[in-house]
Amino acid sequence: METEFTPILSLLGGGLIGASAVLLMATHGRIAGISGIISRILPPRSAGQSLSQGLVFVIGLLLSAPIWVLVYGQSPVQTVSDNLPLLGAAGILVGFGSVLGNGCTSGHGVCGISRLSGRSIVATVTFMSSAFIAVLLLRHVIGA
Amino acid sequence: MKNLVTLIAGLMFGTGLILSGMANPAKVQNFLDLFGTWDPSLAFVMGGAIAVTMPGFWLVTRRAKPFFNDVFHLPTRTDFDKRLVSGAAIFGLGWGLGGFCPGPAVTAVPLAAQGTIVFVVTMLIGMVAAKYFVLWRDRRAWDLAGKTSQL
């Protein structure tokens, strides 16, 4: 299914994501890595780890779409596959892989690359490549 | 104050994801579909984010410490291990198959598409499984190292 090419909106949205990462760094001194923020809330947790800031950030994420709907009066454009077993498998892989690899698109892809971290550059090239292969297989080999 | 700033950061991040199109899995998959319905928008998301984060990080980390903390918690590791590469490869596979990564998936939960809910629940299970796996692996490595030193 085709989607509209949105260079300006995507650039602005990206800028907002970047500004959020800079705000977290300036105030908490932490990397805005979403997989890390979410997984630190989950068990098993090491003793003495503070829960509250991660939870508050996640609440901010969860409020974004409802506020968007209030302001614009319509839901953001979104097409989610109804192939539930596929999304379930994808969820397991994303959850497991992001914790094992210490980061996802935000932590490695945005923050890590901005810090010119070698580990993050290797991780980003790796997950971009495997994601290209996954879509190639899904759409052009299996034909889903 | 601390909580308010964190809440605003979360709101900015989520709104950025929605505005940029990242919260739409079809758009993410089209970015990854070079030989099909390619949509290059996501390159602009990454470009826009890095254009702000790169100079922003440089600027704010020149201060002695962050506003609400005593130190900057920056990753210090520089080695490449199997765990980093295999984790990233597994993550990418799931990202391509589902079109969601953690931030956009959580942000899209209130839009209540069935697929999003299934994705987020299984993602949380995958994260817990990986945390236990890493603990088990580290403990085993520690045990093995202990035995070797006794010999």
Image: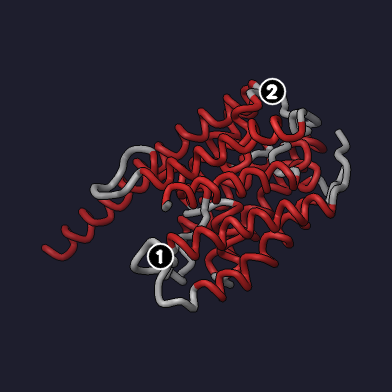
- Are labels 1 and 2 on one chain? no
Give the crowd class for mark 1: few <14, some 14-19, many >=20 residues within 10 Å.
Answer: some
Quarter of the figure with residue A45: top left
Q: Amino acid at mark 1?
A: His
**Residue at x 44% of width, y 64% of height:** A29
Read off the chain for label 2: A
In the picture of the structure, the residue carrying the numbered disc 1 is B73
Whether residue B8 sits left or right of residue B21 in the image: it is: left
Q: Amino acid at mark 2?
A: Asn
Please identify the residue farthest to the left as the structure is shown.
B150
Read off the chain for label 1: B
Quarter of the figure with residue B107: top right
Q: Work out whether A5 lies above or below A109.
A: above
Quarter of the figure with residue A121: bottom right
Asked if disc 1 and disc 2 are in contact, CB closer than 8 Å, the reply is no
Please identify the residue farthest to the front as the structure is shown.
B1
Whether residue B119 is visible, yes or no, is yes
Name the foreground residue: A27 vs B90.
Answer: A27
In the picture of the structure, the residue carrying the numbered disc 2 is A83
Dot 2: element? loop
**Residue at x 40% of width, y 65% of height:** B73
Whether residue B130 sits left or right of residue B19 in the image: it is: left
Q: Work out whether A140 lies above or below A144.
A: below
List x then y, in percent, for residue A21.
Answer: 56, 58
**Residue at x 76% of width, y 47% of height:** B32
List x then y, in percent, for residue A28.
Answer: 43, 60
Give the crowd class for mark 2: few <14, some 14-19, many >=20 residues within 10 Å.
Answer: few
List x then y, in percent, for residue A62.
Answer: 56, 35
**Residue at x 62% of width, y 57% of height:** A126
* Mark identifier at residue B7: none
Spatial distance from mark 1 to mark 2, Cα to Cα? 40 Å
